[in-house]
Image: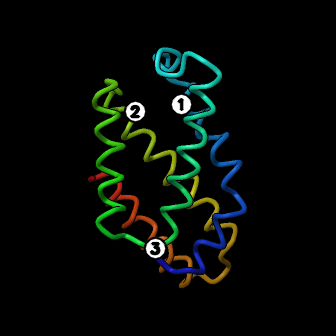
């Protein structure tokens, strides 16, 4: 991932974490997955960590093992598959919107958005 892209998303990490959790609360089943304030705060921290690691550009075996571990937790806890798909769609649109606001050059936006879509697709696949 382009180092430049990291600097575009870093200032939005806190807002992303809050908006993503608000999105999850829109699912009626969400209360059973986040029953306490502590569980909500843990989820916010993990989604922010995911975002920051996404743009570090270090996609080694440890990165993919961590993605697998996260996926296994979702399966173990019975997270509905439509949550995973809808969540990735939320993340994709949110991040593309940031990129659109931050990158003025149309060719640079296309290049970076292709990179963003690729790494998000890899995350979803794993």
Q: What element carries label 3?
A: loop
Left/right of residue 32 with respect to residue 124 in the rendered view? right
Q: Upstream in the sequence, badge 1 or badge 2?
A: 1
Q: Which residue is drawn at 29% across and 49% down?
A: 68
Q: Upstream in the sequence, badge 1 or badge 3?
A: 1
Left/right of residue 111 with respect to residue 36 in the rendered view? left
Q: Where is residue 97 in the image (x, y as percent from the top left)?
A: 61, 59
Left/right of residue 3 with respect to residue 122 in the rendered view? right
Q: Do the residues labelled 1 and 2 touch (CB within 8 Å)?
A: yes
Task: Name the residue carrying label 1.
Answer: 24
Q: Is mark 2 on a helix, strand or loop?
A: helix
73, 3: nearer the viewer: 73
Q: How many labels does the image show?
A: 3
105, 79: nearer the viewer: 79
Q: Which residue is drawn at 69% across and 67% down?
A: 101
Left/right of residue 17 with respect to residue 53 in the rendered view? right
Residue density around tag 1, few if under 14, some if 14–19, many if 20 or more, within 10 Å: some
Q: Is mark 1 on a helix, strand or loop?
A: helix
Task: Name the residue carrying label 2.
Answer: 83
Q: Look at the picture and state if 1 lies above or below 101.
A: below
The label nearer to you, 2 versus 3, is: 3
Name which quarter of the figure residue 72 lies in.
top left
110, 16: nearer the viewer: 16
The label nearer to you, 1 versus 3, is: 3
Q: Residue at x 60, y 80 (%)?
A: 4
Q: Look at the picture and state if 26 lies above or below 94.
A: above
52, 86: nearer the viewer: 52
Task: Name the residue carrying label 3.
Answer: 57
Question: For residue 39, which numbered disc appears in the image?
Answer: none
């Amino acid at each position: 991932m382009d180092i430049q892209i990291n600097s575009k998303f870093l200032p939005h990490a806190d807002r992303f974490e809050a908006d993503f959790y608000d999105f999850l609360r829109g699912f009626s089943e969400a209360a059973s997955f986040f029953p306490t304030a502590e569980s909500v705060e843990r989820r916010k921290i993990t989604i922010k960590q995911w975002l920051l690691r996404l743009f570090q550009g270090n996609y080694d075996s440890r990165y993919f093992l961590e993605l697998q571990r996260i996926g296994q937790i979702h399966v173990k806890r019975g997270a509905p598959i439509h949550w995973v798909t809808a969540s990735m769609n939320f993340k994709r649109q949110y991040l593309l919107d940031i990129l659109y606001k931050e990158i003025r050059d149309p060719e640079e936006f296309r290049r970076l958005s292709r990179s963003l879509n690729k790494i998000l697709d890899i995350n979803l696949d794993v």
